[in-house]
Image (cartoon, rainbow, N blue to C red):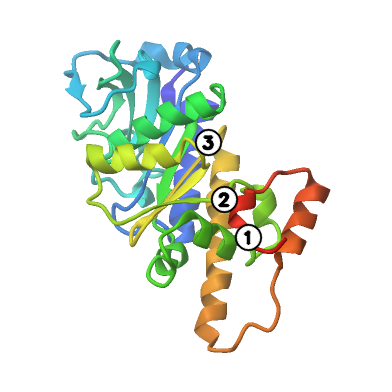
Amino acid sequence: MKVLSHPTIKAYIRMCQDGWEQGWHERNGGNLTYRLKADEVDAIREEFTFERPWTELGVSAPNLSGEHFIATGSGKFFRNVALCPEESICICEMNERGDGYRVVWGLTAGGRPTSEFPSHIMNHSVRVKATNGECRVIYHAHPANIIAMTYILPLTAKAFSRALWQSATECPVVFPDGVGVVGWMVPGGADIALATSELMKEFDAAVWAHHGLFASGPDFDITFGLMHTIEKAAEIYMKVVSSGKPVMQTITDADLRAIARDFKVTLREEFLDEK
């Protein structure tokens, strides 16, 4: 099967377009990776080429040895993925040590995978362990409202999780573990990759202060839905704060516990105050 005809590749391209249409990917902002299943690799392997060199990652993920990932390209624009996918995205094969990769398809006009590929690989590594292999998608975007929140809230998981849970009723159901928060760091290197991956051992999503949001999940719909839910809650929060009006009522901790009980999810008790 041709790469661009495969349903998984089509779904990947659709998610890129959905993110662009949300306004989360100015210029070349954001990146998306997907860990291919063995049968998906087998179905499209005939179009792979192996002349491009192996490249060191700067991080090590031995549990991803030999895995294949779809990734957006460094400097590529999400708005162009649907228009010219073979120039905008690539498929990368990990080496046997899990500390390097080579491009086996895509980026036909040259280039390399996203500069944040090390962060993605480290996040995939820990999410594979945390989910018993279920996690396949890591998505990084620049939603404006969650970024705005990083200027006015303490950069703690508790502060952000509570603010988001109390902003929209579905939030404690969609991400009952809350969200992690990484203080500002220079993107694209090993340090921020390791810092983010530490949080992703516990959380499905992590906020990058003054930068954006990382989300993970087993498929494109769930991962995009997580990003969308968090950003919509952040928009509600910022609109309330920006109104200048005092908050007269909110979703209380008792309400949050009731939601958790009825929807059979477990909230992080350390993020709740009222007993």
Distance between mark 1 and mark 2 Cα atoms: 8 Å
State the separation of the CA atoms marked 2 and 3: 27 Å
The number of callouts visible is 3
Residue 267 vertical position relative to residue 56 in the rendered view, above or below: below
Is 91 rendered above or below residue 174?
A: above
**Residue 142 placement (x, y as % from top left):** 39, 57
Q: Earlier in the sequence, mark 2 or mark 3?
A: 3
Q: Residues within 10 Å of mark 2 (few under 14, many from 20)?
A: many
Dot 1 crowding, Cα within 10 Å, few <14, some 14–19, many 20+: many
Hey, what amino acid is under mark 3?
Answer: Ala
Residue 59, position as x, y percentages in the image: 25, 28
Q: Residue at x 68, y 84 (%)?
A: 248
Element at label 2: loop
- At x 58%, y 71%, the residue is 236
Closer to us: 116 or 59: 59
Name the element at disc 3.
Answer: helix
Check disc 1 and give the amino acid type: Trp
The percent coordinates of residue 106 (x first, y second) are: 30, 28
Q: Which residue is mark 2?
A: 178
Residue 160: x and y, percent? 51, 60
Ranked by sequence position, the earlier of labels 3 and 1 is: 3
The dot on residue 226 is none
Q: In the image as oriented, which residue stretches furthest toward the bottom? A: 245
For mark 3, does the 10 Å Cα neighbourhood hold few (<14), some (14 to 19), or many (20 or more) residues?
Answer: some
Q: Which mark is residue 165?
A: 1
Mark 2 is on which residue type? Gly
* In the foreground, 129 or 67: 129
Is residue 49 positioned above or below 177 on the image?
A: above
Is the C-beta separation of discs 1 and 2 under 8 Å?
yes
Question: Which residue lies under the disc numbered 3?
Answer: 11
Foreground tag (3 vs 1)? 1
Taking the image as shown, residue 86 lies to the left or right of residue 206, namely left
